[in-house]
Image (cartoon, helix red, strand yellow):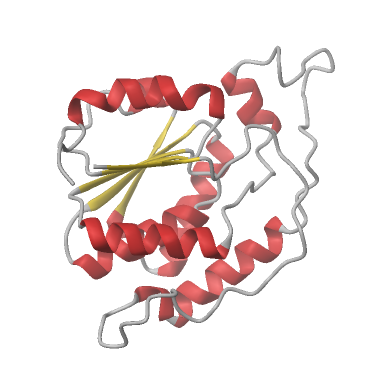
Amino acid sequence: MEVRSGFANPQPVPSGPSRPVRGCSGIEHTDMTNTLCASEVRSVLNRLFAAAAHDQGTPDWQDSGLSWETATAQERADASESTYMPISPEGGDLLYILVRAKRPNTVIEFGTSYGISTIYLAAAVADNGTGRVVSTELSKTKVLAARANLMEAGLEDRVTILLGDAMTTLKDIPGPIGFVLLDGCKDLCLPVLRSLESRLTIGR
């Protein structure tokens, strides 16, 4: 079982200059299928990374009295619905390589956002020829956008995106769970991991 965390900051931060995604993952084996090389996948990722470069880094609170410290998880998600908070292209390549190597039957992602990391996970599952990705997100706006992005990339059949609190949406996902990406608010990562612990694959 593999658990990865730390790609996402719990509070939006300004992004650096946009960098186009490389044509393929950093994997050197030219004889391996790599869905990241597909033009439709590259196009979606380039568009999303370009959009993420304009993240403002300031939550849009509907209630002026709220702050990141006092807001609920749902209020944080609603205030950050226009913020991408993406992994880097290099981080995406790493996710792809890890999932290819582990060949998990079930991949869990906590924090879909606009689906950038989800695309890398789905591409790896597709190229493995087995497995599925289950991702969860509190923001309805982001869920709808992520589903559309996955459809545009041609990877929608590899992913189920669940809307709601991960402590609820993931409670009935059967094991074994072979790979977990904790990509949501950091103060919720440990509770989510503990809720999945009994279903995690034991092994390498």
Q: Position of residue 109 (x, y in %)?
A: 39, 42
* Residue 101 percent location from the top left of the image: 25, 62
> What is the count of numbered marks?
0
**Residue lying farthest bottom?**
30
> At 74% across and 53% down in the image, what residue appears?
15
Q: Residue at x 21, y 33 (%)?
A: 200
Tell me which residue sits at (78%, 48%) in the image: 14
Q: Is residue 67 above or below residue 46?
A: above
Question: Which of the 4 quarters of the picture holds residue 180?
Answer: top left
In the image as oriented, which residue stretches furthest toward the front?
204
- The residue under the point 58% across, 73% down is 21
Q: From the viewer's perspective, is 50 left or right of 163?
A: right
User: Hey, which quadrant is residue 1 in on the image?
Assistant: top left
- Position of 45 compared to 105: left or right? right
On the image, the x and y values in percent for residue 23 come to: 50, 81
- Would residue 88 appear left or right of 82 to someone viewing this image? left
Q: Which of these two is toward me, 195 or 40?
A: 195
Q: Is residue 82 left or right of residue 90?
A: right
What residue occupies the far right of the structure in this picture? 64
Q: Is residue 85 above or below residue 88?
A: above
Q: Position of residue 81 (x, y in %)?
A: 65, 38
Residue 125 visible, this angle: no
Q: Is residue 139 above or below residue 20?
A: above
Is residue 68 in view? yes
Of residues 202 and 163, the one drawn nearer to the viewer in this rendering: 202
In this rendering, the answer to whether 2 lies above or below 197 is: below
